[in-house]
Image: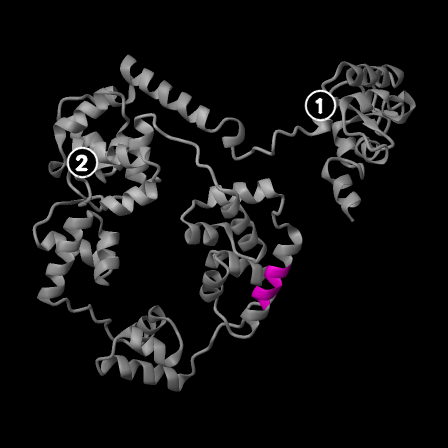
Amino acid sequence: MAKGKPLTAEQKQQIVDLYQSGQNTTQIAQQMGLTGVTASRLIRSLGLTRSRTIPEQQRAQIVAAYNAGKSSLQIGAELGLCSTTVAKVVRQAGTTRGTEYRAARDKRIIEEYQRGASTVQLAENYNLDASQVFLIVKKAGALRVQKRITLEQKTAAVASYLSGKSSEKVATEIGVCAVSVQKLVKSAGHEVRRRVITEDERRAVVDAYVKSGSSDKAAKITGVSGPMVLSICREAGLPVVNKRLVSCHLPTDEIIAAHQSGETTIEIGKRYGAEKSVIGRLLKKAGFRLDDLNILTPLQRQARKNRYALHGLRQRGENSHRWKGGRTDLRALIRPSAKYKAWRTAVFQRDNFACQHCGCKGGSIQADHIYPFSRILDDHQITTLEQADECAALWDVDNGRTLCESCHRRTPTWGSKLQRKMQV
């Protein structure tokens, strides 16, 4: 389907029927020639979203692939799932990789880099960004010395370029990038040739731009740079605004109706493949004042409230990315209890509300367990609030001391310092 063309009523009904029959939005998008985002947006707007159930066999397959070293992105691409769903299944199985796995991965990356692999190759192999690989290698102090080009190589590169070869071919011959070749040609006092575009290539560029509506996509399709695509389209008489087709190609009546029903310019722009500024100019040209675009009408306010409420329901409970199986940390349950507050007050009163290290009085003071709070829970194997109430060591006032926040932070048992020590 061409970009920017709205869905017909028949297409919408077909999407709904396929979704209700059990297909997911990815399958529907492939079947109807749409993007997954378009199908998902329509389903959400109609309130028909369903929680996806992952069968046990597929869960076991995800965990096995994750344990084999694959990332959530790779597993999702293989099984047709999103990486968030894969990560959630892995967390529920309790098999998330930690510091040891990352250390082993970084070691392999450094070894392969030292054997001659590039950061781009390593990024593709380990499903990382090239900048992440660069930082890993840089942190280890293993960066290779930048390649130096000899005078003979420079002379030969300039001669090859002047003989008619492209900068890409010359770069491949001497083992550098095309930009370096162009810099060598400029430093030698020569001009860099502009790529000659044939008439067939020009027609292909124009067709790709009209169909995709984006200079970036047209550049990938035709192999021409983005700025060259825009230049060709302007020469061909195509109106170019923000790398998108201008608003005169958009259905004005439908956009106005969508705006009046409560949709924002961003949502409308995503539907028709246009920037929000293009939608804003179209609405302004249709008679809407700029202030009207920023001030929500009662209908728009209610529509946005409904969207937020639906989003909150989708992110609640097990659907939340912070879900940990319904478990709340025991320490978070003990600290707000009345017994803990009474113990803290008793410690403050005994020390006259003064820090026992620096002597400051009042302000941000805290009650610290000398025999650490977390270690008491571990040593006495306390797992419930009832067990915590019966543990005398936890409520011993002599085991408490008053500290200001700055002094408390400098203690070896502050925050995650103790947790790291206990893990070692």
Q: Residue at x 74, y 17 (%)?
A: 337
Q: Earlier in the sequence, mark 1 or mark 2?
A: 2
105, 315: nearer the viewer: 315
Q: Position of residue 26 (x, y in %)?
A: 33, 44
Q: Position of residue 15 (x, y in %)?
A: 26, 36
Q: Which mark is residue 244?
A: none
In magenta stretch: residue 105: yes
Q: Residue at x 77, y 16 (%)?
A: 341
Q: Residue at x 61, y 55 (%)?
A: 102
383 to the left or right of 136: right
Picture layout, residue 366 above or below residue 201:
above
Badge 2 local density, few (<14 within 10 Å), some, or many (20+)? some
| Number of numbered discs visible in the structure rendering | 2
176 to the left or right of 284: right
Q: Are marks 1 and 2 in contact (CB under 8 Å)?
A: no
Picture layout, residue 1 above or below residue 132:
above
Q: Quadrant of residue 326?
A: top right
Q: Quadrant of residue 161?
A: bottom left
Residue lying farthest to the right in this orientation: 398
Badge 1 is on which residue? 333
26, 137: nearer the viewer: 26
Q: Amino acid at mark 1?
A: Leu
58 to the left or right of 4: right
245, 95: nearer the viewer: 95
Badge 2 is on which residue? 6
Q: Position of residue 104 (x, y in %)?
A: 63, 60
The region drawn magenta spans 104-110
